[in-house]
Amino acid sequence: MAKLIKLTRTSWQQPFCDRKKEHVLWGSHTEVRENCNLLDGTRRLLQVSFEPRFELDVVDYFQITSGREIKFPKALVDMVSPIVLENPESSFVITVLDGAEQEGGKIDTKNDPANLITGRATTIMARVGQQKFRKQVMEYWGGACALSGVKEVNLLIASHIVPWSQSKNGAKLDPFNGLLLAPHYDRLFDQGLISFSDDGSILLSSIAEKLPPEFGLSKSMKLHKLNPEHLPYITAHRKTFGFA
């Protein structure tokens, strides 16, 4: 099993080195077990954070086994396994949430975990559904950037047209509220520097028009597969950022 990388007293990084054990995190550092009080048979509130490109962060109560391992539930295993197998050089970070650091590295376990769930974990847990969203957006756009046609699956971003935080429940995971974009186009779109007309033609802000050629922008660019169901979201994006 790969050696864990200590980040703080309550968090550590797990490399994807042992591809046969992607469903188990070993609390192999004595210091981790001592500071986080990982006791056999207990359930602890943990955050499992992957690289941002995977759009998968999970907060839940995880089973501690033998005081050394954190057992992942099957639902998480099903999501994690393909990530691990396809990205052996990557990693994830585990953070213990149901305890606050005190002087001397002791953990105060009297804090109510429910407060942490309400204040911090709810929005993170919601992102689990974005795995399905990303898959559907990828399928619709054929695994290619909706604007440039570039096919580089590991780099492309399934971007919400109307942001998750501003979307109604039905729109949060609606694949038509998504565009598959290369990172720099995603950033420009997210910042409202570009948008699109109802026929998919690109709209450039005054700032975008002045960007150098290296940004790969052209007034002739157009989304290559726009569906009528995209239009309410595209319209909302234009209005938000003041495009005519």
Image (cartoon, helix red, strand yellow):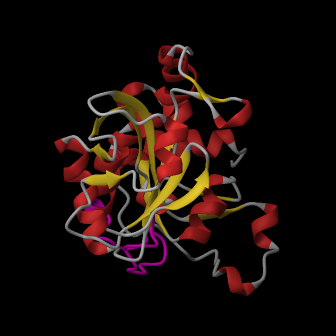
Percent x, y of residue 111: 57, 16
Percent x, y of residue 89: 41, 77
Q: On the rendered image, what quadrant is the N terminus found in?
A: bottom left
In the foreground, 197 or 93: 93
In the foreground, 106 or 43: 106
Residue 22 against residue 94 in the figure, above or below: below
Q: Residue at x 34, y 73 (%)?
A: 17
What secondary structure do most residues of the magenta stretch adopt?
A: loop
Percent x, y of residue 64: 30, 37
Magenta segment range?
A: 139-159
Q: Residue at x 26, y 30 (%)?
A: 41
Residue 153: say if magenta.
Answer: yes
Q: Residue at x 43, y 65 (%)?
A: 91
Residue 6 against residue 133 in the figure, above or below: below
Residue 92 against residue 45 in the figure, above or below: below
In the foreground, 90 or 15: 15
Residue 185: say if magenta.
Answer: no
Residue 160 seen in the figure:
no
In the foreground, 82 or 218: 82
136 sits left or right of 58 in the view: left
Percent x, y of residue 130: 37, 45
The image quadrant that residue 126 belongs to is: top left
The tally of labels here is 0
The image quadrant that residue 38 belongs to is: top left
Q: Residue at x 77, y 71 (%)?
A: 209
Residue 128 seen in the figure:
yes
Residue lying furthest bottom: 213
The image quadrant that residue 90 belongs to is: bottom left
